[in-house]
Image: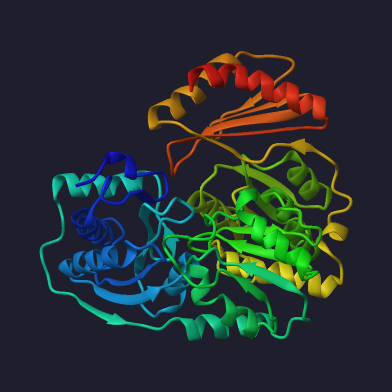
Amino acid sequence: MFSPVIFREYDVRGVYLKEFDLVFAEQLARAFATFLVKNRGYKKLKLALGYDARLSSPDIQKAVSRGFQMAGAEVINLGMITSPISYFATFTIPECTGGIMITGSHNPPEYNGFKLSAGQSTIFGADIQLLKTIIDEQSYLPLQSGSESDFNIFPSYLERYKTEFFPLKQIPVVLDCGNGAAGVIVKDLFHTAGLEPIILFEKPDGTFPNHHPDPTVEKNMIYLKEAVLKHKALLGIGFDGDADRIGVIDETGKLLMGDELMILFSRAILEKNKGAKIIGDVKCSDRLYHDIEKRGGVPIMWKTGHSLIKEKIKSEKSPFGGEMSGHIFFADRNYGYDDALYAGLRVCEILSQTGKSITQILADVPVAYNTPEIRIDTTEEKKLSIVNKLISVYSKPSSDTQVNLLDGIRISFPDGWALARASNTQPVLVLRFESSTPEGLKAIETQIRSVVDPLL
């Protein structure tokens, strides 16, 4: 049993037992193994398999393992890990041909899903839809007998980053795992770098009893903010459910926007990579793109989505990129995928080496008035129809506006911009607004909401 809507742009995700079940999980594994053999040319499959802290994840893991083995694959069970560690496995386990990470990421507890790695890349777009076709047609590989074994990947992960970071100058830092998968490794990781963090909600718990594990939403970061101020920490770092998204609180208790964090990183990158291309998604502020250009970099705006940004970084040979949503990608010194724990260490490194606070480093960033990412719950159909309506309204040539249709619609006004796009992971309409003045922000938002709100 499954609903077609779970096949999204860059992963497969939905409400467990409502939009997919264990039979589907087994079918998806068989379909993915078939895809790897027939469409990627692998003759022998050695597949990594991990899962997050959600209550449904262990059962789904067993179903996926069965499906892989039915295709003759050698299954390497990694246990409860972060999504970035599942990617790390594809780069470091000899002869690994890909794998599946079972995770609902930042979605509510009833969700779960699958991030699929073919070789060292995650698949997206038409390849995701091809899996649905294989399942619909039942055009699987012939039934075979595979194998499975358990593998502890943590020692090699820790050693890799101990080599890179140790010893970092000690700085006061607070971490918030949100009861997600970060808790299985983050203490050991930061210790290997030479840091002694204070850790909140470290124990993985798929009910997420303390707060929802999305560190880009301010209400989820209240405890982290309080801890930063109480302990006079230099920063606080929050992780989402599978630790591929990061949120950062500065020493004053302010939550950084994703693009403000990217300015922090891009400045450090461009000091050593003159003229480098830096990738940002369509939700990022103009301030980011202007700052990259000002410091000698080449800013590139791209579509939202972790797989899409990852591929763009690879194709452009970029050392760094990121999204407003807190996905941060380092090809500089790392593998080019989004690892929030690694990004957290890079923030600590910048502060350790410069001796400055985040506020001091970003003091010269121009003031802008903006909204956070506004996520409006709606239906799969409405989120698309609203974006299409805005396209029809603003597609006519105008001296006052410029329109970018790269991903949804981004409308540039003389004093700011607006974005509307359909989420690729949920039945959600995403809006964001920015202006150089408070009055401009209000005017831009009012103008766009006058089209959007009647259609909700």
Question: Which residue occupies 33% across, 45% down?
Answer: 7
Q: Residue 313: x, y in percent?
A: 58, 55
Which image quadrant is residue 37 in?
bottom left
Q: How many marks?
A: 0
Q: Can residue 332 be seen in this view?
A: no
Query: Closer to the camera, 195 or 405?
Result: 195
Q: Residue 362: x, y in percent?
A: 84, 55
Query: Closer to the camera, 95 or 357?
Result: 357
Question: Which residue occupies 33% across, 64% down?
Answer: 57
Q: Is residue 103 above or below residue 419?
A: below
In this picture, residue 121 sits left or right of residue 202? left
In this picture, residue 78 sits left or right of residue 194? left
Query: Closer to the camera, 62 or 406?
Result: 62
Q: In this view, does 449 lie above or below 130?
A: above
Q: Is residue 143 above or below residue 416?
A: below
In this picture, residue 406 sits left or right of residue 167? left
Q: Which residue lies furthest to the left in this view?
A: 143
Q: Residue 338: x, y in percent?
A: 55, 61
Q: Is residue 55 visible?
A: yes
Q: Is residue 188 above or below residue 297?
A: below
